Amino acid sequence: MARVPRVKICGITTAQEATLAAEAGADAIGLVFHERSPRHLDPDRAARIIAATPAFVTVVGLFMNPERRQLETLLQILPLELLQFHGRESGAFCRSFGRRYIKAVGMSGNPDMDSIAGEYGDAAALLVDSHAGDRDGGSGETFDWSRWPEVPDRRLILAGGLNPGNVGQAIRELRPWGVDVSSGVESAPGRKDPEKMQQFIQEVHRVRESH
């Protein structure tokens, strides 16, 4: 039986969205702490969202080149289970907070995946995105899937431009460990659409059933 990829709905901005994502079958939700993003949260809003998130749904905090002191302060007040780094953070920086983490790898350049897999060898997964580093995510852009990296024994998460219409094809072609969606299930930037979230997750499960 084919394994169902894990699904993360990123850019959750309200407690209601967190509840709806969980009811739709999401394995994880992402909370964005990058000020340039329309999905950016302050600690109070994030705390309300986390409180509304049911058991067995992982809460992931997304950061992009954060200042150490600010992140340490945030981790003192928010029970984030996973950290996701989208900037130019070093492996040493990512692991220094004592939390499990995901490192995003931008495919807009020509990343050396062997080197990246080595530097972030203790990452829970590598997230392969259309861009990373100094560019904001959540743009809805895809990358050339023929460039999907082969990194033995590493869990890879696919992100960038996914939506209910293309996630099935992506899973069939690439077989990622997980898929990460944000703008592809929104009615407007920062506003998740309940029907699109349901359609996305249903499509993920439909691919397994068709195999």
Image (cartoon, helix red, strand yellow):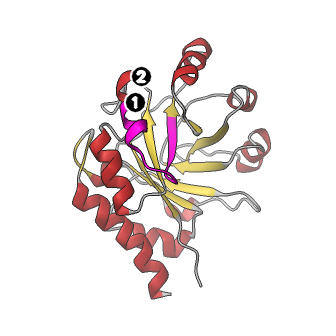
- What residue is disc 2 on? 43
Between marks 2 and 1, how big is the CA–CA gap?
5 Å
In reply to whether residue 50 is colored magenta, the answer given is yes
- What residue is disc 1 on? 46
Q: Residue at x 49, y 70 (%)?
A: 171
- In the displayed structure image, the side of residue 14 where residue 145 appears, left or right: right
Q: Mark 1: few, some, or many residues within 10 Å (few <14, many ≥20)?
A: many
- Residue 143: percent from left, percent from top: 46, 54
- Residue 63: percent from left, percent from top: 51, 30
In reply to whether residue 120 is colored magenta, the answer given is no
| Occupied quadrant, residue 118 | top right
Q: What stretch of residues is rendered in magenta?
A: 47-61
**What amino acid is labelled 1 in the image?**
Ala
Q: Is residue 16 above or below residue 200?
A: above
- Residue 79: percent from left, percent from top: 54, 32
**What amino acid is labelled 2 in the image?**
Pro
SS type, badge 1: helix
- In the displayed structure image, the side of residue 183 where residue 124 appears, left or right: right
Q: Is residue 210 above or below residue 57?
A: below
Is residue 35 in view?
no
Q: Are marks 2 and 1 in contact (CB under 8 Å)?
A: yes
Q: Residue at x 54, y 65 (%)?
A: 146
145 or 167, nearer to the observer: 167
67 or 132, nearer to the observer: 67
Q: Residue at x 56, y 51 (%)?
A: 128
The dot on residue 91 is: none
| Occupied quadrant, residue 191 | top left
Is residue 139 in view?
yes
- Residue 77: percent from left, percent from top: 52, 22
194 or 52, nearer to the observer: 52
Q: Residue at x 34, y 62 (%)?
A: 24
